[in-house]
Image (cartoon, coloured by chain):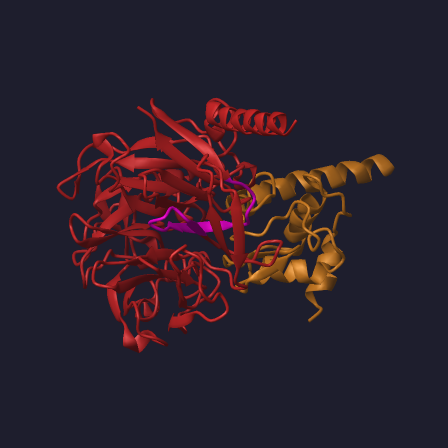
Amino acid sequence: MGGFAINAAAQDLVKGKQLYETRCLVCHQADGGGVPNMNAPLDGASNVVGTDIARLVRIIKKGYSERVALDGFYYGNAMTANPDLKDVDIANILSYIRTSWTNKASTITAAQVKAAGSKK
Amino acid sequence: MKNLKIFLAIVFSTMTIVSTAQNNAGLKLPQGFKATLFADTIGSARHIAITSNGVVFAKLMYPNKAGKSIIRLEDKNNDGVADKISGWGKYGGTGIFVKGKSLYATSNTGVFLYQLNDNDEVIDTSAPKTIVKGLIDRNQHESKSITLDGQGNIYVNIGAYSNACQEKDRMPGSKGMMPCPILDSAGGIWKFDGQKENQVYGDGIRYATGLRNVVGLDWNRQTNSLFVTQHGRDQLNSFYPKLYTADQNAELPAETMYEMKQGDNAGWPYVYYDPYQKKKIVSPEYGGDGIKEGGENAIDPTAFFPAHMAPNALLFYTGNQFPEKYKNGAFIAFHGSWNRAPLPQEGYFVAFVPFKNGKPNGEWEIFANGFSGLTGDEKVKNPRNAKARPCGLAQGPDGSLYVSDDNKGAIFKISYAK
């Protein structure tokens, strides 16, 4: 049982990585470092590894067009919305970015994304 | 004993000069050129300006750790390294320009004017004149770069707060707005009086339009006209994967240099410049397919460069120190790309375009490289790996070229030694 759970999670991270590479990498970069002043970093970013999952889900779904203040720096580019992504896709992306590079936060399930998406 | 101290001081200061001179502050330069690290870690140094006495002023994107956003640097012992550094100002910005004893600096919404004394010190740092105010700042392409012509007029870039003027910026499938309403207040160069206070949009004129975002601009004294370098659009492949491959995205569109006369239009957002077809191509947001030509009313670039390298400063060299081929030619500081991923990034160098009679005269070349701090032919994979990102250029009274970096805030001084 335990082994199955680990395999399933690993599979989700592979899917998350694939989605990251097609949708996110061009701006947030392969190393999650973002682009100074323009595109926010994900690696080491307090809000990416933080507990406000609803905010992360909202940003991925709806995009973001305000200046982001993050860990003492500002980022100005608009982020693309991803209205076509399913909860499970968002969970896989979040799981990937929260556990990649130097990030060591928890993975996220589709149920968590669904619950977060229903919050205002 | 006292003599020994002086002797040691001379030995040590000479050693420092030799060591920085020997490795040229880490830069790769053409034969005969040398560089010193004029300053380091002063803050995110965007553009720089130099007085006739050789005092350097740098505009920081944000206030530095000491809370200063305009930095004054002086090299009193003339060893190529600033030894008297001070600062003031709480507003971030990009533009800075010196004309005689007038020092102009910009925030992301306005232009301010400080008066210098005979020692090129600001007489009153707390009370600049507000020359222009109320310019648009919507986070994206917000920096205001400036230059002046010989008549005392100031030219301000107001970047478009958009990638391609879509109804929803950077949203796949969102159409381009027709006509693009952004062009009324941004996406071009505005001309204002260099002395009149409190000017707003209505006091100036839209001098040139159709420019997505210009960071580098300079008044060419030979042609008596304005030249600009534009940052081309992003994300052709991520938004239009059926029309463009990732490899094509990495090479499209060209970064462009234009000579802009009053009323000129460079075509953004309706067209972009394809460096392979050497044509203005209709943007996919406006029904383009990567082949269809457009921009009948738009001018062609004076010169063009590989995509996404981000030309952040332009300087026509008027000094006498460098060899003859550099005279009146254009130096361009390429900040370095981010939008070529998954391919390696490009730029992070200072390029040179030879000019003759006000027109490019030969291919562009890399003049100064190695700002990224990577060794050999290693390319920058991610922008944050670059140690320094060239952002500003200025010419010293002795003809040396200064290059600023907005990452940690280095300033490099490049000189020619016969």
Q: Is residue B240 above or below residue B268?
A: above
Instruction: Tell me residue B302's x, y (percent).
Output: 21, 45
Quadrant for the C terminus of chain B in the image: top left
Q: Is residue B121 visible?
A: yes
**Colour assignment, chain A:** orange
Pinpoint residue B325: horizontal percent, then vertical percent: 21, 31
Q: Is residue B52 left or right of residue A81?
A: left
- The answer to which quarter of the image holds residue B252 is top left
Q: Residue furthest left?
A: B357
Please state if B130 lies on the left or on the right of B222 as rendered: right
Residue B129 in the image: above or below residue B303: below
Query: Total marks drawn?
Result: 0
Q: Nearer the viewer, residue B127 or B328?
A: B127
Q: Is residue B243 visible?
A: no
Residue at 81 percent across and 40 percent down: it is: A5
Residue B345 drawn above or below residue B130: above
Q: Position of residue A52 (x, y in %)?
A: 73, 60
Which residue is at a point 31% across and 74% down the rendered structure image?
Answer: B196
Q: Which chain is red?
A: B
Magenta range: B39-57
The residue at the point 75 percent across, 57 percent down is A111
